[in-house]
């Protein structure tokens, strides 16, 4: 999200500088280090698109690593690498290196998201998953809103100071190894018996419980098969390590493949609309920083509504509701630009309401998607969905260019896609109050029920 606002700031300053210095007959390149205006303006859009390309590559590569090597290790490596790249981005003077670092930041960011998306879902019992999603979404919204404040404070300084601040905020990544631990469900599914015992001892000490008493509820025969007698512990009646899957299983198994097609379409549509609205905030009337702040703030109420609906009507109908409202709002925003008298004001209001709904739909997908996949395909499934989203986000920077020539074009496109995807969600199984599937057979059984 920092990258999006940097791009908006650079565009605004570049155009302002061009107007000022062209009148005086001075060379623009004395003020703009990379001269990303006029016929070179597309290079700025390309640098933003490279973040999305990096996210696309990272979503595929790191999701496979997360399922194979665990959630915790990938999180630590990607977090440290992304922080280093963010700091390096603030000091580079070469445009090619700048683009490469942005691509790497996108890739490592996806590594963190794939690992944490699975870890959080697996760490908490069924009744708390929606609450965890709410907290994460609120922190995202707060961070983006805070970003616009810092950008406003640094508006008379180089964007490099803002980028350096973004990098330094991630310095706490150095303590991730000791703060967070591996997913117990992943350890069980992969037969990591020594790590399971260490995990239980550590959790028992933290909660002031007797670890031996807890371990006594486990039966460990010579084959080290794990049978669990606690409702709060993952169902591990299968022999650990037997259920090994890879990315091809998503295509080979009909039920998972059909679910994946619907999920991929939804992630593409929501991501295109979500990031397109953010990048189009610079073309809305009024102050660029205030527009960015309001759009970020519009996400927060939708998270509380999503949390309430998750618990009342389930994941599937909550997602359908948000997609329907977002589609209607974005089409109304586009039509107001073409036909309404107070076009700018109405368009901003409908765009904020559209952002409210799209953000809610995004939260639904973040919770719903990993719940649909078995343990050793969970991160891979989430990664492929995120890859579909990156295809949408790669296209999103060009929505602002389309808006220059056809102001109502992006809104109609986003809205029509949101409405069309709602019908496909009727084919998906509901996951409310359903235990996470450990194997493909568990998924088939819960889908039939």
Image (spheres, rainbow, N blue to C red):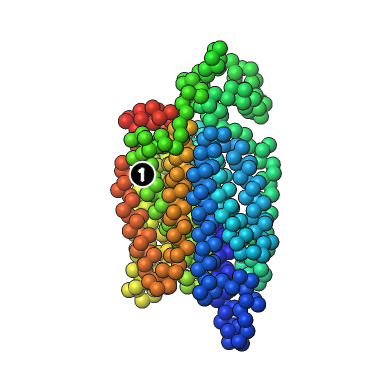
Are there few (<14), some (14-19), or many (20+) residues within 10 Å of tag 1?
some
Q: Is residue 22 left or right of residue 322?
A: right
Question: Residue 285, image x and y in percent?
Answer: 47, 73
Q: Position of residue 418 (x, y in %)?
A: 35, 55
Seen in the picture, residue 414 relative to 285 is either above or below; the reply is: above
- What residue lies at 56% left-to-right and 55% top-to-bottom? 103
Tag count: 1
Residue at the outermost top position = 222
The secondary structure type at the circle numbered 1 is: helix
Quadrant (top left, top right, bottom left, bottom right) of the C terminus: top left
Locate the N terminus by quadrant. bottom right
Is residue 229 at least partly visible in the picture? no
| x and y, in percent, of residue 260 in the image | 38, 42
Q: Which residue is mark 1?
A: 261
For residue 212, side relative to residue 321 (left or right): right
Instruction: Give the residue drawn at x 47%, y 20%.
Output: 237
Q: Residue furthest bottom?
A: 24
Q: Is residue 238 visible?
A: yes
Q: Say if 276 sits above or below 258 in the image.
A: below
Residue at coordinates 31% horizontally, 43% vertically from top-left?
426
Name the residue rendered at 69%, 49% in the picture: 171
């Amino acid at each position: 999200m920092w990258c999006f606002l940097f791009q908006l700031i650079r565009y605004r300053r570049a155009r302002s500088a061009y107007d000022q210095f062209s009148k005086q007959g001075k060379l623009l390149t004395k003020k703009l280090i990379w001269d990303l205006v006029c016929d070179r303006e597309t290079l700025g859009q390309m640098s933003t698109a490279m973040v999305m390309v990096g996210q696309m590559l990272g979503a595929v590569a790191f999701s496979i690593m997360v399922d194979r090597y665990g959630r915790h290790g990938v999180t630590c490596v990607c977090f440290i690498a992304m922080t280093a790249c963010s700091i390096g981005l603030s000091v580079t003077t070469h445009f090619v290196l700048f683009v490469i670092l942005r691509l790497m930041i996108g890739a490592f960011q996806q590594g963190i998201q794939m690992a944490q998306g699975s870890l959080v879902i697996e760490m908490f019992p069924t009744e708390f998953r929606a609450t965890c999603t709410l907290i994460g979404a609120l922190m995202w919204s707060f961070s983006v809103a805070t970003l616009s404040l810092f950008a406003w404070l640094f508006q008379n300084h180089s964007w490099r100071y803002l980028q350096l601040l973004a990098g330094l905020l991630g310095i706490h990544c150095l303590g991730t190894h000791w703060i967070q631990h591996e997913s117990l469900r992943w350890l069980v599914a992969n037969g990591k018996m020594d790590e399971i015992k260490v995990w239980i001892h550590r959790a028992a000490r933290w909660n002031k419980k007797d670890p031996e008493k807890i371990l006594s509820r486990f039966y460990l025969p010579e084959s080290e098969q794990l049978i669990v007698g606690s409702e709060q512990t993952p169902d591990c009646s299968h022999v650990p390590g037997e259920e090994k899957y890879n990315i091809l299983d998503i295509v080979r198994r009909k039920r998972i493949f059909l679910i994946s097609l619907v999920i991929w379409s939804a992630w593409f549509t929501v991501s295109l609309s979500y990031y397109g609205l953010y990048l189009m905030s610079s073309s809305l009337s009024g102050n660029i920083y205030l527009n960015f702040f309001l759009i970020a703030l519009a996400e927060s109420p939708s998270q509380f509504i999503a949390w309430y609906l998750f618990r009342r009507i389930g994941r599937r109908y909550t997602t359908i509701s948000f997609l329907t409202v977002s589609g209607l709002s974005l089409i109304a925003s586009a039509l107001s630009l073409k036909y309404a008298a107070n076009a700018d004001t109405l368009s901003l209001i409908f765009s904020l309401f559209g952002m409210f709904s799209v953000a809610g739909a995004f939260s639904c997908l973040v919770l719903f998607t990993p719940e649909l996949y078995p343990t050793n395909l969970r991160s891979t499934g989430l990664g492929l969905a995120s890859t579909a989203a990156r295809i949408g986000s790669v296209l999103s920077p060009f929505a602002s260019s389309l808006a220059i020539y056809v102001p109502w074009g992006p809104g109609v496109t986003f809205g029509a896609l949101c409405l069309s995807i709602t019908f496909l969600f009727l084919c998906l199984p509901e996951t409310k109050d359903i235990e996470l599937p450990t194997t493909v057979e568990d998924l088939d059984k819960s889908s039939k029920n």
